[in-house]
Amino acid sequence: MSKKTEEATQEVENVQNEEEQTEPQISFNQIAAVTEIIDLCSTRGAFKGAELEAIGQIRNSFAGFVDFHAPKEEEKPTSAPSAEGTEETSE
């Protein structure tokens, strides 16, 4: 083999090793989608009765995770003017 061919082969192997070593990632939206998919499949009758308990437990785990980590809507304080701060004293 020529030196150029060996270098090209080594480079391809390095790239393949780097791709294999990357940790698989899962997004929050994908987890939320799993809950929706389970709900949809359940509605369409895709599961047998004996499977429902196990599927329900998994679905509830995913739904609990999504509910816990979902961005919370911040409550906006009502900014009604206070009557105490607006009174003027006259002497």
Image (cartoon, grey):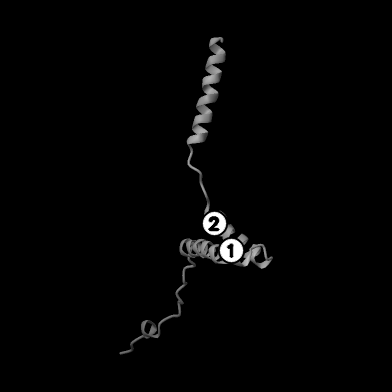
Residue in front for this viewpoint, 51 or 25:
51
Kindly give the residue lying farthest to the bottom in the view shown.
91
The quadrant the N terminus occupies is top right
When the figure is inspected, residue 86 is found, relative to residue 8, above or below; the finding is below
Q: Residues within 10 Å of mark 1 (few under 14, many from 20)?
A: few
From the image, tell me which residue sits under label 2: 31
Residue in front for this viewpoint, 90 or 50:
50
Mark 1 is on which residue type? Answer: Glu
* Residue 31 position within the rendered picture, expressed as x and y whole percent measured from the top left: 54, 56
Q: Classify residue 81 by image quadrant.
A: bottom left
From the image, tell me which residue sits under label 1: 51
* Residue 82 position within the rendered picture, expressed as x and y whole percent measured from the top left: 40, 82
What secondary structure is found at the residue carrying circle 1? helix
Q: Residue at x 59, y 58 (%)?
A: 33
Kindly give the residue lying farthest to the top in the view shown.
2
Q: Residues within 10 Å of mark 2 (few under 14, many from 20)?
A: some
